[in-house]
Structures are given as C-alpha cells and as structure tokens.
Amino acid sequence: ERLVSCTREGDTVARLGGDEFVVLLPGLGNTQQAARLAGEMLGLLAEPFIIEGSSNYVGASIGVAIFPDDGSLASELLKKADMAMYRAKATGRGRIIFFEENMNVVQQEQSVLERELRLAITRGQFSLRYQPRIRLSDGKLSGAEALLRWQHQELGWVGPEKFIPLAEEVGLIDEIGAWVLRHVCAQLGQWQTAGYRITLSVNVSGRQLRSGRLGQLVQQALTESGVVPAALELEVTEGTLIDNIEEVGEQLGQIKQTGVGIALDDFGTGYSSLSYLQRLPIDILKIDRSFIRELGRSDGAGSIVHSIIALAHALGKTVVAEGVERQDQVELLRIWQCEQA
Ligand code: MG
Ligand code: MG
C-alpha cells in the first residue's frame, strides 16, 4: 500500500517474492523523476509499521535501471536493477543506486572470485592467524582470536571483508566455518598438550547462525580434537543478532549450555543495544578498537570505555579491550579493572 501510494496512474507495483518488490515506471520524463519517486518510497518505508501495538522498522534498499540505456529487454532491466540494489545494500542500506556499466565488471570479478573461493579449501589456500589476548592482571597470555586468511596463487591475499560476505552469499560459509572450527580446535588441542592453558575464539557470521548447523559443527570439532568446550569461544557481532534475536539467542543459548563461551564482538560500533546484553547468553564483551584507540586522547572515549566496563561487570560479564597497542591504554584499562586486552 505504501509503495502504491507514491506511484502514478499506470505504474506497476509487484512483489517478486520474499522481500523483493519491483516498481515499473513507464514514460518517465527524465531519470531524476525515478530518483524522486524512489526517494519518496524510502521515506514511506522508513516509517514504523505498527503490528499488534508495537513499532517495527524495515526500511529498504533500491536499485534503478533505465530503459533503453541499461537494456531493452525486461529480463536485462531486472537483472541490472538487481545488481544496483545489491550495491545499495552493500553500501549501507536505505539507499538508492542507479545501475552503472562498471557493476557488470564488478559482477564478473565476483564470479571469478566465487569460482576460486569454491576451490580454496581443497587447494589448501586458507590459513589461520592468532591475535593474542592478554590478561591485564598479570600480563600473561590468556588466549587468542583465530583470524582466517586466504592466499590465492594469482590474486594474492584476499581480505576477509571481501570473501566472507561472498561466502555467505553463495552458501559456502558453513563449509568454510566448519574448516575453521576444525582447525582451531586441532590447534587448541596441540597447544594444550604442550602445556598452554589458553582459550581460542572463532568469529561466526550471521548466516552461520541462521543455518542452524552451528551447534552441531562446534560439537563435531570439539569431539574430534578432544578439547574441552570451555576452552573454545564464539564471537558474534550485533549485526548478526539484529535480524533474528529470538532464534539466534536460542541457538547461542544451546551452544553456551555445552560449555562453549559466547562473546559479543566489536561492541560499540553497531546498535550497542543494552537490551541485548541482558537478553542474550553472552559471557564476554569485546569493546571495539575505535574506542580503545582514542583512550587517553579524548575524554569522551575514556568515559565511554569506563562506563561500558562498569556496566558489563554489573551484568556479570568479562570485558576484553580490542586493539590495545600502547602502555597508557593498558594502564587505564587496569585501573578500570578490564580483564583482558
Ligand atoms: Mg572478532
Ligand atoms: Mg572484533
């Protein structure tokens, strides 16, 4: 109804399926008109939807393709509008993006990357790096965060910010996630045998949680390696939780019951919702590096970090400060009784 309300007589509004809609605007005088109508649509969709008395927010991302510049066939126009929409989503949602020829190039690059990513595991191109975690009370190593790296023969190092979203999109994330869990647990087993009493943490993505197989994969990796669950931690970001807090919360709760630790990653950059802290089965709060970087340089950052630590402690959670690189940061964090860096 909202989409129809901002179209003109003779325009078409259709639902393609799922949460995708198509609006056909024949006989536009100029492309600015499409931008204007799309802008109105965004505005209307940004208004809350009242369902059973509570406000729900959805928003939208809009991709635009223009006949005949972008194509003369319906299928072509739809494909290009779709590409533009994905770009709109990727650049931060709530945007309108017009199709551009270079998106075709990007699309082709993506196909190459996808093909290569499918082969990366069997070709042994993945490896793990470990970012150490230090206990602030005694300066000893308490654990590490496992970071996945992909080195391709011709493409070189491909950053995770590039291949993780792609892996999610094309359905490879479960396979890659399982590989990571297996290798991290095997490494953990070796280090523990060597006498190191440490925990290792693994980042998990939203798609992994939504697939419903995460608990099983974690269990498998633990059993194979003989590592105790308490030595493993999963890191989730708020972005992961936002879409489906009930379901994700339940899954995390089940995993936590087996003894595996759950950490909320990059806290402070997303919604920083205090209700999550209370509602989700989180043991550890990781304060994002952007606040830690400013410690001792801006009073604001200090107050925020100090308050987050106090709040987390009041809720019975352990705090990890991310990206600590200077001694003055360490000293402040020690005073505030932050557990780890
Ligand atoms: Mg992390
Ligand atoms: Mg982080």
Image: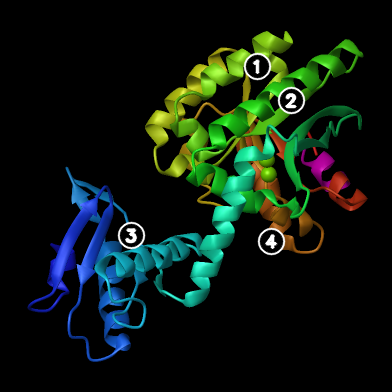
Which type of secondary structure does the marked residue at label 2 adopt? helix
Q: Main secondary structure of the magenta part?
A: helix
- Which span is picked out in magenta? 331-337
Amino acid at circle 2: Val
Q: Are marks 1 and 2 in contact (CB under 8 Å)?
A: yes
Amino acid at circle 4: Gly
Report the colour scheme: rainbow
Q: Between disc 4 and disc 3, whose residue precedes?
A: 3
Disc assigned to residue 221: 1
Q: Is residue 253 magenta?
A: no
Label 3: few (<14), some or many (≥20) within 10 Å? Answer: some
Q: Is residue 15 left or right of residue 84?
A: left
Alpha carbon separation for disc pair 4 and 3: 31 Å
Amino acid at circle 3: Gly
Alpha carbon separation for disc pair 1 and 2: 9 Å
Disc assigned to residue 300: 4
Q: Which residue is the site of mark 3?
A: 59
Q: Is mark 2 within 8 Å of ligand 1?
A: no
Closer mark to the observer between disc 3 and disc 2: 2
Disc assigned to residue 184: 2
Alpha carbon separation for disc pair 1 and 3: 39 Å
Amino acid at circle 1: Ala
Closer mark to the observer between disc 1 and disc 4: 1
Which type of secondary structure does the marked residue at label 3 adopt? loop
In the rendered image, the vertical position of residue 271 relative to residue 6, given as above or below: above
| The one of 331 and 123 positioned closer to us in this rendering | 123
Label 4: few (<14), some or many (≥20) within 10 Å? Answer: few
Label 1: few (<14), some or many (≥20) within 10 Å? Answer: many
Q: Between disc 1 and disc 2, whose residue precedes?
A: 2
Which type of secondary structure does the marked residue at label 1 adopt? helix
Q: Residue 255's quadrant in the figure?
A: top right
Q: Are marks 2 and 4 in contact (CB under 8 Å)?
A: no
